[in-house]
Amino acid sequence: MVTKIINYGSLNIDYVYTVSHFVRPGETLSSASLETFSGGKGANQTTALARAGALVSHAGKIGAEGLWLKELLDKENVDTSYIHKSSKSNGHACIQVDEKGQNAIILFAGANKEITKDEINATLKHFKKGDYLLLQNEINNVDYLIEQGHKKGLIVCLNPAPMGKEILSYPLELVDVLIVNETEAKALAMKKDYESALEELEKLYPNTELILTIGQQGVIYSFKGKQVKVPAIKVEVVDTTGAGDTFIGYYLAAKVEGLSVEDCLQLATQASSLCVSRRGAQNSIPSRSEIQ
Ligand code: RIB
């Protein structure tokens, strides 16, 4: 039977401002350009999954002005039948990108945080034991999704981004695959460096596969005493937006294909290094053929 992946996640309109530096308190800063892209950690990760070749469904909520976000996912052959419509505004992100390609993001959740338990129940009933449920932290009811996903025997994968203190009250012990960056790992483990954060997470969640991305230093996988490290690829950075999402989508697509952990990490690393060499979020996610 085919393994399906359902990503319950955000769909944002990204407004990207090109600036010399991030705006400081009290400063009014002119932007060299303003571009509008489709984004949201959820929709970005779904796009990465689809471009990596996975069979993926996206669930979430859009406002009236966000219909084009759904249509873009349709063009990627994503099953969008679980995307609901809200009378509220669509979620959006105000993104500053500086000269080094780094970003600073303000989020407005909008419709992303209007998801009801009834919608979740009606969606999850279409998925069976062994299918994957991917989650980020840009929608509401993430704790309920973790519980229900686990109850149904889905493989629950969580990227706790953006990191907020509410995440500490989520039933994280039910998560099968936890994908974190350095900041998220330190906040979850309440440690000051990533090495001790990883050790703590291993102790706290012994049944969870941990994937820790550490920027320029690469990525570490850890599960039941097995550790795999893959270095980052050096590229000229244009815009880091969506790089983490690209990594996650590619990693999971490769995992579902049955690739070895090392091959999954390598593929995901290659994909995200291509992503940072381009501007934008979803539009900068490479296709599988570009990587191979
Ligand atoms: O991870 C990048 C994404 O974060 C952007 O697309 C933006 O929408 C924010 O959610």
Image (tube, rainbow, N blue to C red):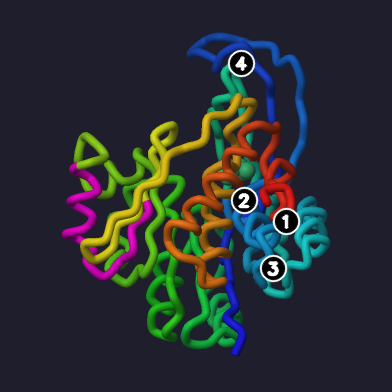
Measuring from the top left, give residue 287's x and y in whole percent.
Answer: 72, 52
Q: Amino acid at mark 3?
A: Ile
> Which residue is the site of mark 2?
110
- Residue at x 76%, y 54% (from the top left corner): 69
- Of the two numbered discs 3 and 2 in the rendering, the one whose residue sits closer to the viewer: 3
> Which residue is the site of mark 1?
63
Instruction: Give the quadrant of residue 214.
Output: top left
- Name above or below for residue 186 compared with residue 158: above
- Crowding around mark 4 (Cα neighbors within 10 Å: few <14, some 14 to 19, many 20+) is some
Magenta-drawn segment = 196-211
> Which residue is the site of mark 4?
99
Task: Residue 54: say if magenta.
Answer: no
> Which residue is the site of mark 3?
83
Q: Which mark is residue 171?
A: none
Disc 3 is placed on an element classified as strand
N-terminal of the two: label 3 or label 2? 3
Measuring from the top left, give residue 137's x and y in whole percent.
Answer: 47, 54
Q: Amino acid at mark 2?
A: Gly
Q: CA distance from mark 3 to mark 2?
A: 14 Å
- Crowding around mark 2 (Cα neighbors within 10 Å: few <14, some 14 to 19, many 20+) is many
Q: Does the beta carbon of the residue at mark 4 sit less than 8 Å from ligand 1?
A: no
